């Protein structure tokens, strides 16, 4: 049973905003009462621009820094465009955190393969912070990240600093490379066959456009990974965020309440069905 | 450093996993080791596709050029992968450039030699096709995903 005020936004303020790429911004937000609630990697908040509307946005910051809520937003519609225009000090509405996040407890003792495409790195970043904070509790940690081009990559400075670490392997690829790019070129699922991990004792966390995720799942299964070891973060039309309105129904589940992170074997019947 | 024979290299390459000894000998009869320095081309667009390569070490960029533009890389390949499929299909001409991004060690397979052996021994030819068709399908799927531009702004 949700608290009666789950539908009532708290007042939050923009503390800082920075541009990640042409259309993507990261906002640091502070809100009363956030410290007490905290959040789990993979959860999302509902953000409101008053007079414009409300949208679900994944948390992309460090869950250990509970007072700072970080959201990475692509400006693609009226609300998200208004959100990224908010300057430090401006108020917005905030509900959350909501949803079921990444299975961090199940990942303990296993290799962890994170597969991110485009903006999908944002919901995976809190999981990465959690993995790195408790690094000794996990096997090999490997991030495979694909972006449209080098200029579209998120968190570039942080990626560079993680690439210098010995306890995490990071591979980056782009779909379209300008001249001078010396990294990988090709779609992110092509990195999976080269990734060293023990398919029998691994867990895969996958987030990105749904088509990309379907190709990534195929590659993970070819590599020997069981369906029950693959987790996806899904996206549907989330409105109430508490499983009441039904807008985000996906087969027998509500993405806002039962997800957004799902184990693949629970979703495979429905993924790719045009009707849902 | 342990030196491995060409036969061992080919037999252990994942592309030839499951290939019998006799067929492996047929493959090795068409193979030779090659080394490419960074920036050197494995082949150029338009030239005769008279070989393909098993990459043993190093990365290769597949590139296309257009007037007024620098070379555009559309795929990079690395250790364990195959470079070149144009040798399979007439008129046996490369349709892109393949350039070494770093020092590349590869096994080059003589295409004419292999084609003749495939024609002479259809069972061997079928074994080769069983390895190349999945490669072509994987390339097709990857290209589909690439041209869909899935990271672009949703319509």
Image (tube, rainbow, N blue to C red):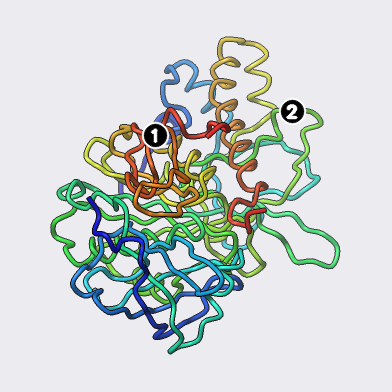
Q: Chain of mark 1?
A: A
Q: Nearer the viewer, mark 2 or mark 1?
A: 1
Residue at 25% in and 64% down = A39
Q: Quadrant of residue A65?
A: bottom left
Q: Which mark is residue A267?
A: 1
Residue at 46% in and 42% down = A216
Residue at 55% in and 20% down = B130
What residue is disc 2 on? B89
Density class for disc 2 (Cα within 10 Å; few <14, some 14-19, many ≥20) is few
Q: At numbered mark 2, what does the secondary structure look like: helix, strand or loop?
A: loop
Q: Position of residue A117 (x, y in %)?
A: 49, 54
B116 vs A93, left or right, is right
Q: Quadrant of residue A77?
A: bottom right
Q: CA distance from mark 2 to mark 1?
A: 41 Å
Q: Which mark is residue B140?
A: none
Density class for disc 1 (Cα within 10 Å; few <14, some 14-19, many ≥20) is some
B106 vs B49, left or right, is left
Residue at 38% in and 45% down = A232
Q: Nearer the viewer, residue A8 or A205?
A: A8
B148 vs A264, left or right, is right
Q: Using the image, determine if residue A27 lies above or below residue B48.
A: below
Q: Nearer the viewer, residue B64 or A113?
A: A113
Q: How many labels, in total? A: 2
Q: Position of residue B77 (x, y in %)?
A: 54, 49
* Dots 2 and 1 on the same chain: no
Q: Position of residue A66 (x, y in %)?
A: 24, 74
Q: Chain of mark 2?
A: B
Q: Using the image, determine if residue A11 lies above or below residue A79.
A: below
Q: At numbered mark 1, what does the secondary structure look like: helix, strand or loop?
A: helix
């Amino acid at each position: 049973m949700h608290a009666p005020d789950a539908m009532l936004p708290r007042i939050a303020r923009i503390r800082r905003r920075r541009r990640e790429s042409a259309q993507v911004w990261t906002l640091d937000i502070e809100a009363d009462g956030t410290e007490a609630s905290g959040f789990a990697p993979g959860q999302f908040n509902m953000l409101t621009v008053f007079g414009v509307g409300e949208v679900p946005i994944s948390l992309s910051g460090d869950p250990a820094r509970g007072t700072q809520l970080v959201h990475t937003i692509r400006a693609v519609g009226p609300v998200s465009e208004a959100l990224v225009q908010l300057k430090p000090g401006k108020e917005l509405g905030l509900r959350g955190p909501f949803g079921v996040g990444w299975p961090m407890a199940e990942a303990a003792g296993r290799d962890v393969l994170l597969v991110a495409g485009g903006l999908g790195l944002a919901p995976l970043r809190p999981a990465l912070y959690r993995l790195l904070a408790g690094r000794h509790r996990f096997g090999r940690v490997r991030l495979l990240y694909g972006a449209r081009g080098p200029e579209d990559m998120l968190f570039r400075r942080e990626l560079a600093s993680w690439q210098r670490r010995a306890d995490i392997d990071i591979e980056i690829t782009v779909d379209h490379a300008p001249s001078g790019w010396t990294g990988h070129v090709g779609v992110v699922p092509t990195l999976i066959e080269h990734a060293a991990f023990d398919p029998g004792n691994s867990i895969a966390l996958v987030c990105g456009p749904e088509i990309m995720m379907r190709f990534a799942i195929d590659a993970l299964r070819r590599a020997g990974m069981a369906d029950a070891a693959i987790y996806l973060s899904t996206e549907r039309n989330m409105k109430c965020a508490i499983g009441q309105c039904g807008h985000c129904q996906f087969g027998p589940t509500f993405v806002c309440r039962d997800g957004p992170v799902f184990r693949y074997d629970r979703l495979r019947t429905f993924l790719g069905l045009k009707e849902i | 450093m342990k030196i491995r024979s060409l036969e061992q290299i080919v037999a252990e390459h994942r592309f030839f996993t499951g290939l019998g000894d006799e067929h492996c000998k047929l493959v090795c009869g068409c193979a030779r080791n090659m080394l490419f320095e960074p920036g050197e081309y494995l082949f150029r667009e338009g030239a005769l596709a008279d070989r393909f390569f098993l990459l043993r070490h190093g990365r290769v960029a597949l590139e296309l050029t257009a007037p007024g533009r620098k070379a555009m890389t559309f795929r990079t390949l690395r250790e364990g992968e195959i470079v070149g499929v144009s040798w399979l299909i007439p008129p046996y001409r490369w349709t892109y450039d393949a350039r070494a991004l770093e020092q590349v060690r590869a096994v080059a397979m003589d295409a004419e030699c292999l084609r003749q052996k495939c024609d002479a021994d259809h069972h061997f030819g079928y074994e080769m096709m069983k390895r190349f068709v999945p490669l072509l399908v994987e390339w097709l799927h990857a290209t589909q995903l690439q041209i869909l531009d899935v990271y672009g702004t949703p319509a």
